[in-house]
Image (tube, rainbow, N blue to C red):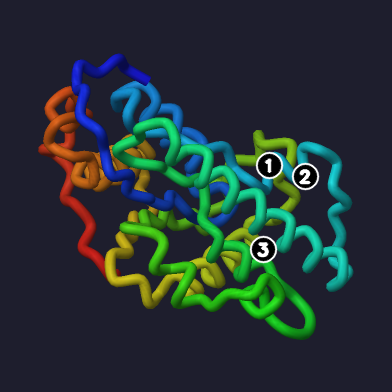
Amino acid sequence: MKPCDCRDRHVPRRVVLTGGPGAGKTAVLELIRLFFCEHVKTLPEAAGIVFGGRFPRSDSPPLRQAAQRAIYHIQRELESVAETENAAVVLCDRGTVDCAAYWIGEGDLFSAVGTTRAREMARYDAVIHLRTPTSPRAYNRDNPLRLESVEEAAAIDVQIASQWAEHPRRFVVEPTEDFLHKAAAALALLRNEVPDCCRHHVRRFFWDDVAGAEPGQ
């Protein structure tokens, strides 16, 4: 992240960057670290921490549910830690609501962890949803933790969209033939969430050539 000469105390805004497998979150996060200042705090993906630590992966409902409960609690703690660091924006690599999209079997995530969907959505100021490409050519398999096929990834993306659908400030970024245009749209949306005291430091990433998404798409 770039140094910032802003010395203001910030009230952190939580912004979620979400999307199905292969949507381009990792690449967009790398660009955010390059173009945005140090007061945009990017969090690691809770699922990556869980599964990278060899938590069992299985299609068994009890194991799948256990994994999502673990991811939920780690996500909450990551967000809590970030808010102690004078962040203007806490950028979450997925949010707690995403866990519900991966839940299978009886019950639901929110009841299992003692909360509600509405309560969890209210914790986030904005949601930027990168849609997963449906073309096999555009689907990136480089992530060793990614096991889903193109079809499975698209189905998960639909579930994620459904879980976040009621958020009042949800922005959807559709796939594009040129990924840089998709990335630029996402960065332009995030720039709008950065306070004025930090926003003028953000280097422009040809946003003028990219139409911003509208909330609730």
Amino acid carrying label 3: it is Glu
Mark before the other along the chain sequence, 3 or 1: 1
Q: Is residue 34 above or below residue 89?
A: above
Q: Along the line of sight, which residue is nearer the eye, 205 or 169? A: 169
For the N terminus, give its image quadrant.
Answer: top left
User: Badge 2 is on which residue?
Assistant: 51
**Is residue 197 left or right of 64 when viewed as pictured?**
left
Q: Is residue 10 above or below residue 108?
A: above
**Is residue 211 left or right of 131 when viewed as pictured?**
left
Pointer 3 and pointer 1: residues touching (CB < 8 Å)? no
Residue at 40 percent across and 57 percent down: it is 129
**Is residue 139 left or right of 166 when viewed as pictured?**
right
For the C terminus, give its image quadrant.
Answer: bottom left
Under circle 2, the secondary element is helix
**Is residue 176 left or right of 140 when viewed as pictured?**
left
Horizontal and vertical percent for residue 159? Answer: 56, 71
What is the distance, in whole Å, between disc 2 and disc 1 at their CAs? 5 Å
Q: Along the line of sight, which residue is nearer the eye, 201 or 60? A: 201
Horizontal and vertical percent for residue 50? Answer: 75, 45
User: Badge 1 is on which residue?
Assistant: 48
Q: Say few, some or many: other residues with alpha carbon within 10 Å of mark 2 (under 14 / 14 to 19 / 20 or more).
A: some
Pointer 2 and pointer 1: residues touching (CB < 8 Å)? yes
Q: Say few, some or many: other residues with alpha carbon within 10 Å of mark 3 (under 14 / 14 to 19 / 20 or more).
A: few
Q: Along the line of sight, which residue is nearer the eye, 151 or 14? A: 14
Mark 3 or mark 1, whichever is nearer to me:
1
In the picture, residue 67 is in which quadrant? bottom right
User: Badge 3 is on which residue?
Assistant: 152
Q: Along the line of sight, which residue is nearer the eye, 151 or 60? A: 60
Pointer 2 and pointer 3: residues touching (CB < 8 Å)? no
Count of numbered marks: 3
Residue at 21 percent across and 63 percent down: it is 214
What is the distance, in whole Å, between disc 3 and disc 1 at their CAs? 18 Å
